[in-house]
Amino acid sequence: MNYPHWLLAIPGGLLIALVAVPHVFVSHFAVGGGFFLVASESRARKQNDSAVLDYCRRLSKFFALLTLVFGAITGVGIWFTIGLVSPAATSTLIDIFVWAWAIEWVFFFIEIAAAIIYYRTWDVLPAREHQLVGWIYFISAWMSLFIINGIITFQMTPGRWIQTHSFWDGLFNPTFLPSLVARTAMSVLLAGVFGYVTLPKGEGRERVARLAAFWILGGGLVLPLSLRWYFACIPQFSRTYLDGVLTGARHALLGGIACTVLTLLIALVCGLWKPRWMHPAVVTVLVIGSFGIMGSAEYLREFVRKPWVVNQVVYANDLLVAEIAPAQAKGAAHTANFLLTDETGAAYGEALFQQQCASCHVAHGYRGMARRVNGWDADFAADILQHLPAMHGTMPPFAGNETDRKALGSYLAGLNPAWHFAITDANRADVGAKVFDSRCGHCHSVNGKFRPLRGVFEKQTASQVKDMFPVLGSMSPDMPAFNAPDDQADALAYYIAQEANRPLPSRAAPAQMPIGNTKSQMMRPAQPWPPQQADYGLAGPGFQEVR
C-alpha cells in the first residue's frame, strides 16, 4: 500500500491485456519465425531452390520490422502499464529476479543485433556465416523466452521458493517445463502462420505453403498436450476454475479449443491438400484464429491465478499478503501512504474502491461494480466485504477495518438507486430471481455447478425457506446476515423453493450439498471453496489462507 493508485476508465488488468497479448503474440513469432527463417534458408540452399531462398530474403525484412519495431514498442508498453497498474507486484518480480532480467536483456540485445545483421547481409556474408547469424538470433530469442517463462510461471507456482527464497527454486518452479514446451510449440505454430502472411505469388508458392503447414500442424499437435501437462501442474484452486463453474474461464477454454481446431483445419486443407486455396481472406482467418489461441491461453493463465498476481505473495489488487492484517487492525488510512485521511466523507469510500478494487473493476462499464451490487444496501455491502474470498474464490480479502467497510459499502450501495417493487403473484418469481442474483448469486446457484442450494431446499415450501433467512449468518462464517425487506424475502423464498423443486433431467442434476445435524454442515459446499491451504500444494512463511 505504498503506491498511489492510477485512475483509469477501464480496469487496469484489461489495459495490461490490450498491450500484452499483441506483444506476446508477436514475441512468440519472433522466436519461432527465426527458427523458420534459418531452417528454410538452409533447406533451400541444400536443394538449390532459388524461389524459396528469395522468399526467405523477403520474409526476413518483414520479420525484422515486425518483431524489432512492434515488439520493442509493445514490450516497453508492458513495463509502463504493469508499473502503474501493479507497482507492488512489478517491484516484487524485479527484486526476486533482478539477475534473470539482466541476463534476458543481454540476450535481447544479441537478438536485435543478429536480426538486423541477418537481414542486411544476404549479399555480403557467405551462406554458412549468414546461416550462423540466423542460428545466433534463434538461440538468443529462445533463451529470452526461457528466462521470461520462468518468471511468468513463478507467478502461478512459486513452489519451494516460499520456503527457501532461492532464485533457482523460483525460476525452475513446478510449471516451468510444461509452460516452456507449450510456448515453444506456440512459437512453431506462429512461424507457420506468418509464413502464409508473406506467401509468394509465383514460383515456390505451393512449396512454401506446404512447408508452413507442417510447422502449424507440428506446433498445433504438441500445444494441447503441453497445455494439459501445464494445467495438471497448477494448484488445485486454479484447476477448480476449469471445471465450468465460472463462465469466463469456460468461455476462454472453449474459445481456445475452437481456435486451435480452426487453425489446424486451415493448415491441413488449405496448406497441405489445396495450397491454391490459401487466399488473403483465408490467411486473415488463420491469423485471427492463431491470435485467439494466444489470447485465450493468456486469459486463462491470468484468470486461474486469482485471487493472486503472485501466488501467496501479492494479491490481484496489488496488496502484499503482509499488508492485509495491519490494514484490518488499524484501518487502510493508517497503513497506506497514498489514501485520504478523512475516514468520514463520501470521497473516502471512493478512494478505497480505487485502491482495492480498480485493478479488476470500475464503477460503471466493463466489469463494472454497479451491475454486480445492484440491490445492495449499505449494511449488506459492508457485511459482504468481510466475505470477499468466498465469492467464487477469486477475490482478495478486504484490507480495512469496520470503518473502512462501512465507507466502501456506502459507496457501492450508492452506485444504484434503492429497489422498490410492487410484487404480485404474476411477477413474484421474476422478482425473486432478481433478489437471488443480487443477494445469493455471487456465491451460490440453485441448480447449477457452483455451490448448488438444491440439496438444502428441495422438498421445502417457500415459508420453510424463508424461516431460514434470519439465521443464515450463523450457519457459516462466510455467510453475510440477510437484511432484505420482507416483500423481497417473500419473493426470494418463493423463487428458491420453486427452482429447488423443479424436475431436472438426471444428467443435469447438480451435486447435492450434504445435509447433516448442524447448520454449518447444511450450508457447506459439496466441495470446499476456496480450497484449504493443503490444496495449494504450497505452504510456508507468508502464506495467508484464502477462505
Image (cartoon, rainbow, N blue to C red):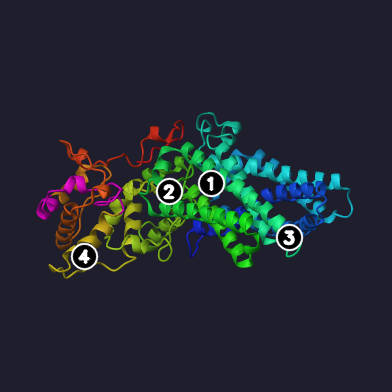
Residue stretch in magenta: 442-467
Q: Secondary structure at mark 1?
A: helix
Estimate how packed mark 4 is, as few (under 14), some (14 to 19) or many (20 or more) residues with alpha carbons within 10 Å.
some
For label 2, the residue is: 334
The residue tagged 3 is: 62
Front: mark 1 or 2: 1
Q: Residue 338, can we see it?
A: no
Q: Which mark is residue 89?
A: 1
Instruction: Pick whichever of labels 2 and 4 is earlier in the sequence.
Output: 2
Q: CA distance from mark 2 to mark 4?
A: 45 Å
Amino acid identity at mark 2? His
The residue at which mark 4 appears reads as 430
Sequence-first disc among 4 and 3: 3
Q: Identify the element where label 2 is drawn.
A: helix
118 falls in the magenta region: no
Q: Is residue 197 above or below residue 333?
A: below
